[in-house]
Image (cartoon, rainbow, N blue to C red):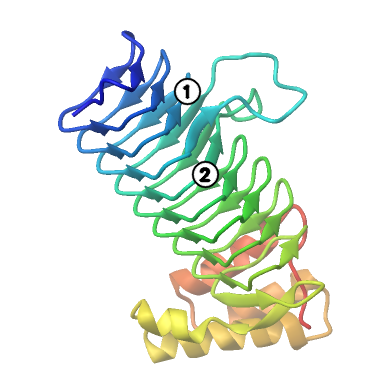
Amino acid sequence: MISPLAYVNPEAKIGKNVEIGPFCYIDKNVEIGDNNVLMNSVTVLDGARIGEGNTFFPGAVISAIPQDLKFAGEETTAEIGNHNTFRENVTVNRGTAAKGRTVVGNNNLIMEGAHVAHDVFVGNGCIIGNTTKLAGEVIVDDFAILSACVLVHQFCRIGSYVMVGGGSRTSQDIPPFIMAAREPIAFVGLNIVGLRRRGFDKNIIDNIHNAYRILYQNTKLQAERLELIKTEVPQSKEIDYIVDFVKTSKRGIIQPA
């Protein structure tokens, strides 16, 4: 299953039923689990920890050192979960002393030319579009969709079930369950189609809508608006998530168009 034209360091740990194509390079201090497919010209460098059932298309580079001038060669990792797809020329850098690791969860699709920088955390079931770039220490929660050519500033957080329009750029957090687009980026409504596809109940969608109506249309201070959401909208894990996301945002959330 390993091409004679590939290089695999003797110290690398390779699981069962792993395909490694020609011109791949597997460095020392690498762990690759079972049933992974590395097509030709995939590079896996020091610090990679790869789960099971992932597919890496040609040109992908996993666990390269961070593009961060503060990086001093510390031992860090790039941790890949299970059943992800990394299309052509995707780059995933390993962590720095800030967090020690970059993490991509399970069942994600990372499309051609996307970049996942140092200390990023990508959850599960996400889609990262062609040439989208995630800067250092970005967090992408589960089931978020970032369309093509999206630029995300360092330290930003993208909420679950978000749809971010192609070509957008953000230097603020994007709260969950919404659509974000335009220039400058703005809240443009709920991701209703995405929520329905994921099986959200109509009452839950209505409650999410009411929460954002209070958050974005009320003129009170943000802390007061969050308290209104807690008292006027029926409690659920989705509403708690919205309130906690906004309350803990370090860069502030995007605003309506």
Tell me, for residue 53, which label it has, or none. Answer: none
Q: Label 1: which residue?
A: 45
Quadrant in the picture for the C terminus: bottom right
Viewer-nearest residue: 55 or 222: 55
At label 2, counting other C-alpha atoms closer than 10 Å, the crowd grade (few under 14, some 14-19, many 20 or more) is many
Going 30% across and 48% down the picture, which residue do you hit?
Answer: 83
Residue 87 lies, in percent from the top left, at: 44, 50
Q: Label 2: which residue?
A: 89
Disc 1 residue type (three-letter): Leu
The part of the image, by quadrant, that contains residue 255 is bottom right
In the picture, measured across the screen, residue 95 lies left or right of residue 181, that is left
Going 69% across and 55% down the picture, which residue do you hit?
Answer: 152
Q: In the figure, 38 relative to 143: above or below?
A: above
Question: Which structural element holds mark 1?
Answer: loop
Which numbered disc flags the more N-terminal residue, 2 or 1? 1
What is the residue that sits farthest to the left in this orientation? 17
Q: Is any atom of residue 79 visible in this view?
A: yes
Quadrant in the picture for the N terminus: top left
Going 33% across and 17% down the picture, which residue do you hit?
Answer: 8
Residue 66 lies, in percent from the top left, at: 64, 28
The count of marks equals: 2
Q: In the figure, 29 relative to 49: above or below?
A: above
Viewer-nearest residue: 56 or 135: 56
Which of label 2 and label 1 is nearer to you? 2
In the picture, measured across the screen, residue 104 lies left or right of residue 215, that is left
What is the residue that sits farthest to the top in this orientation? 10
